[in-house]
Amino acid sequence: MHIARIAVGAQPDFALQTSAGAWVPFASVGIDAPDTASAISQIRSVRARVAAGDGEPVAGEPVLQCPVVRPSKMLAIGLNYMDHIRETGAKQPAAPVVFAKYPNSLLGPRGTIVVETGLTKMGDYESELAVVIGVRTRHVTVDDALSTVFGYAVANDVSARDLQRSDSQFSRSKSFDTFCPIGPWITTADEIPDPQTLAIRSSVNGESRQESNTAEMIFPVAYLISYLSRTMTLEPGDVILTGTPHGVGFAMTPPRFLGDGDVVRCEVDGLGAIENNVVTVG
């Protein structure tokens, strides 16, 4: 099942995709969902009403917007793919490298990434599997961790590499406005029985850059959820970005950073793709 946020008149709304491929807005079945946590809490009611024939599908192809709205936390993991470790020459971490990526960075699956060249000369892409938490979670075991997942999406952890190197932590370099495109929708967890078997890739202007598989993760999704839940309560709608594979721009010879007019496509098998234009501003 896919849950998207779409443009419906002047007010965006969450929508459920039917088996026929049509999108039914939550409002058309009498459900108000101002954020992702609300959408998660009411998805069973929406699904039941749509199955009963309620609701009015939107006509044509909807304009997809960011399906993550007002998460309480956005957590990200660095150096979590063995192939990325090999390309950078970094030391394999003994524990997950965790940093925050703030909600102001959120962007829709077709939105424009803005690279402010007065602040960074090294904008870079990172195709990632995003995990959306579905229930309040604390001290969950690895064996039970996947049961807490509402769904998965594709994300681009856009990064300012120069700030990433100069700062003592990653959060500022990863949290420019527009630096977290995500979508194209949330695919519910029942559609993805094993998140460690998914091909993941990216391209810039049609040129393949990243080509890997989530099996390359050092710390799998279940471990990451369990690890994070030891120290903090994960809330419905929270997002975990699980790391990126090899092929990022800064590791190329010579490095190749994002420029004005570039088009970045990130894709995960079974979850769809996001594609974002890049503009640079001084």
Image: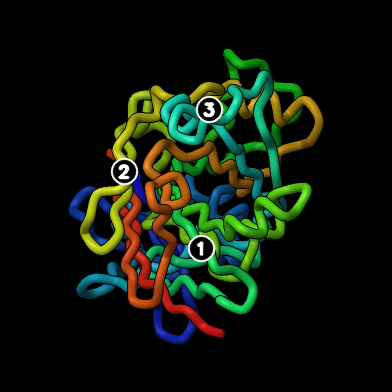
Element class at badge 1: strand
- Which residue is pictured at 52% across the width and 38% down the height? 243
Residue 142, percent from left and from top:
61, 16
Q: Position of residue 115 (x, y in %)?
A: 52, 73
The answer to whether residue 134 is left or right of residue 100 is left
Nearer to the camera, 173 or 138: 173
Labels 2 & 3 near each other (Cβ < 8 A)? no
Q: CA distance from mark 1 to mark 2?
A: 18 Å
Q: Which residue lies under the disc numbered 1?
A: 123
Q: CA distance from mark 1 to mark 3?
A: 27 Å
Of 110 and 235, the residue lying toward us: 110
The residue beneath circle 3 is 221
Q: Is residue 42 visible?
A: yes
Left or right for 54, reference 219: left
Label 2 Cα neighbours within 10 Å, binned few <14 / some 14-19 / many ≥20? many
The x and y percentages for residue 54 are 34, 61
Where does the C terminus fall, quadrant-wise?
bottom right
The residue depicted at 28 percent of the width and 67 percent of the height is 57
Q: Amino acid at mark 2?
A: Arg
Residue appearing at x 41%, y 24% in the figure? 216
Closer to viewer: mark 1 or mark 2 = 1
Residue at mark 2: 201
The numbered mark, 2 or 3, whose residue comes first in the sequence reads: 2
| Earlier sequence position, callout 1 versus callout 2 | 1
Q: Which amino acid type corresponds to the residue marked 1 in the rendered image?
A: Gly
Numbered disc in front, either 2 or 3: 2
69 vs 94: above or below? below
Q: Which of label 1 and label 3 is nearer to you?
A: 1
